[in-house]
Amino acid sequence: MILTPLGRRRWNSFFRQKRAWVGLVSFGLVFLLSSTAELWSNSKPLVLKRDGQTYFPAFVRYAPELFGITDTFVVDFRELVARDIAAGKETFSIFPLNEWDPYEQTQDVMVRPSAKHWLGTDSLGRDVVARLLYGIRVSLVYGVLFYLMTFALGVVIGSIQGYFGGKTDFVTERGKELIEILPFLSVVILVNGLLKSDSFWVTLSVVVVLSWVSVASQMRAQFLSLRRREFCDAARAAGASDARIIFKHILPNALTPILTLTPFTIAAGISTLTVLDYLGFGLSPPTPSVGELLQQGRSYIQNAAWLLIAPTAVLCVTLISINLIGESLREAFDPRK
């Protein structure tokens, strides 16, 4: 993509800011570790060489019969490797640094951080490091999808409002006011209860339906300001259709200030999911969740403080880094500069 001189100045201004680099490096580290969680925390080996064959159990699902196991549907690769070594077989395996799965329950219930469990375990004996790695990935995916869906809905509705105005604008504004007065958390909890569902997509859809209003208002304001500008009048005089004026002339100019809200919207999505999981109305168990770990940490704060400290630290680093990026973008793309 070829940037205009103004675009280059804005991006140069963004990358000159120290807080932008702090945010990018911090968020990049969180994103890298969470997106490649299987490489760092897994009960299955990354590579397994056995009986002259090479397997990749962390990435490929193999039938237990392939390893001579007929009494279970799940292969315990740690036990398999230990049994092969005890029998004198030439078995080679490479396990991740943290050899625990986020769903794996052990007898080590709420044990303190140790060499075996770096950040301890939770009330069901699940490794906290594994739960955090996979949980923050779920939160990031949720935040990005929340942003994309919210912006898509808000941009479309706000554009129609701002361009056509009149009765369309009046009716839509009344609908937005109705949504804004609804108690957010209460409605999400009520809908989840009525649908008897706490799935990822149901929770996300309900939150998006209640969260697009601010984006639509921003887009409406941009369209109201731009639709009477000289370049729009010239396009109308040249016979351009409404669709061409909207998509070719107004929307590219209106999106620039809106896009600076991207990091803040993603952070809002992550925070919303964390709150819902904390209250027990988010994702269904046993999905790894930062909010669920925070809830356990609050319940067992006197006996297992690590359950509160670890997820709080990870959540703070993630949200602060995203907000640093957002503040830097807002500073760089400020139209008054």
Image (cartoon, rainbow, N blue to C red):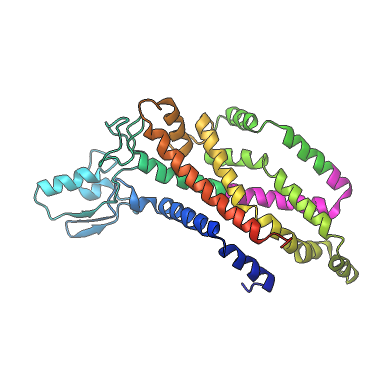
Between 218 and 159, the one lying in front of the other is 218
Identify whether 159 is placed above or below 277: below
Does the magenta run of residues contain 138? Answer: no
| Residue 253 on image: x %, y % | 74, 63
| Residue 75 on image: x %, y % | 26, 44
| Residue 195 on image: x %, y % | 59, 31
Is residue 102 something one can see in this rendering?
Answer: no
Magenta: main secondary structure equals: helix
Counting every numbered tag in the picture gives: 0
Identify whether 30 is placed above or below 239: above
Between 42 and 20, the one lying in front of the other is 20
Q: Quadrant of the N terminus?
A: bottom right
> Looking at the image, which residue is at 22% across and 54% down?
93
Identify whether 230 is placed above or below 310: below
Q: Spot the residue most to the right.
A: 237
| Residue 57 on image: x %, y % | 30, 52
Is residue 126 something one can see in this rendering?
Answer: yes
Q: Spot the residue most to the left.
A: 88
Q: Quadrant of residue 238?
A: bottom right
From which residue to which does the magenta span run?
A: 145-170
Identify whether 73 is placed above or below 326: above
> Looking at the image, which residue is at 30% across and 37% down?
113
> Looking at the image, which residue is at 34% across and 51% down?
40
